[in-house]
Image (cartoon, grey):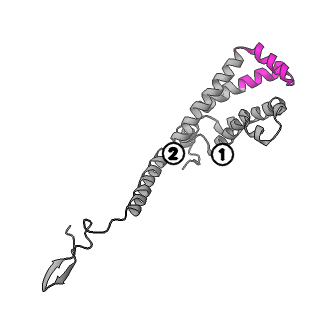
């Protein structure tokens, strides 16, 4: 495609107008840098949009493994877990310690797989509410200390998983597609 040039008269001859040519135009570095920054930001946002499935997957894998490993440790040392539950003053430690350990182990596995993620998040969050109510709250004297509790952070992550769901790289997503159910991820 040919570029149209602007011409102007100078001393009776027609010369090309070079005032609009990029080589002769005044260069505004600030505007150029801002434009480049916005273009880079847009490319980054486009890349993030294409990789939107990766965030929930990485969170589920890491967080799920954490709970799988924690539950596994308690299940393989139930006497120690029961003794800690007794020390903490939790009711029915012979029943509640294995239940908590099993919840953490199975919940971690389900999070890794992305299976029943929303239900699992509710159950795991409830487990953390019990931990706060019976154990952690005894050492808390204010809001700052409360929000610094590990259990509170875990509840926030479970809340996010409950609302956002497991993402597209999950068994929940595959099952919903197979059954023709409405997919909240699209």
Q: Is residue 65 left or right of residue 98?
A: left
Q: Main secondary structure of the magenta part?
A: helix
User: Where 70 falls versus 12 (above or below)?
Assistant: above
Where is residue 8? Give x, y as percent: 20, 82
Q: Secondary structure at mark 1?
A: helix
Where is residue 143? Give x, y as percent: 79, 42
Please report the bounds of the magenta region as a residue range: 76-102
Residue 86 counted in the magenta span: yes
Residue at the spot 68% in from the left edge and 38% down from the top edge? 158
Tell which of 3 and 142 is nearer to you. 142
Which of the 4 image quadrants contains residue 117? Answer: top right
Real-space CA distance between mark 1 and mark 2, rounded to the nearest whole angstrom: 15 Å
Which mark is drawn over residue 52? 2
Which of the 4 image quadrants contains residue 80? Answer: top right
Q: Would residue 123 be visible to someone looking at this image?
A: no
Residue furthest out toward the left:
13
Residue 68 counted in the magenta span: no
């Amino acid at each position: 495609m040919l570029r149209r040039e602007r011409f102007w008269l100078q001393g009776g001859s027609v010369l090309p107008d070079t005032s609009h040519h990029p080589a002769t135009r005044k260069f505004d570095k600030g505007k150029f840098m801002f434009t480049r920054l916005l273009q880079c930001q847009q490319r980054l946002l486009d890349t993030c949009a294409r990789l939107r499935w990766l965030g929930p997957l990485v969170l589920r894998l890491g967080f799920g493994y954490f709970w799988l490993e924690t539950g596994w440790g308690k299940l393989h040392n139930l006497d120690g877990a029961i003794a800690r539950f007794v020390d903490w003053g939790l009711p029915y430690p012979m029943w509640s310690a294995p239940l908590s350990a099993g919840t953490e182990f199975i919940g971690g596995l389900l999070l890794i797989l992305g299976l029943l993620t929303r239900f699992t998040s509710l159950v795991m969050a409830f487990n953390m509410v019990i931990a706060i109510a019976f154990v952690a709250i005894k050492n808390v004297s204010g809001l700052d200390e409360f929000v610094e509790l590990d259990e509170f952070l875990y509840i926030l992550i479970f809340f996010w998983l409950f609302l956002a769901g497991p993402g597209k790289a999950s068994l929940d997503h595959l099952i919903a597609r197979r059954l023709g159910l409405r997919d909240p991820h699209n």
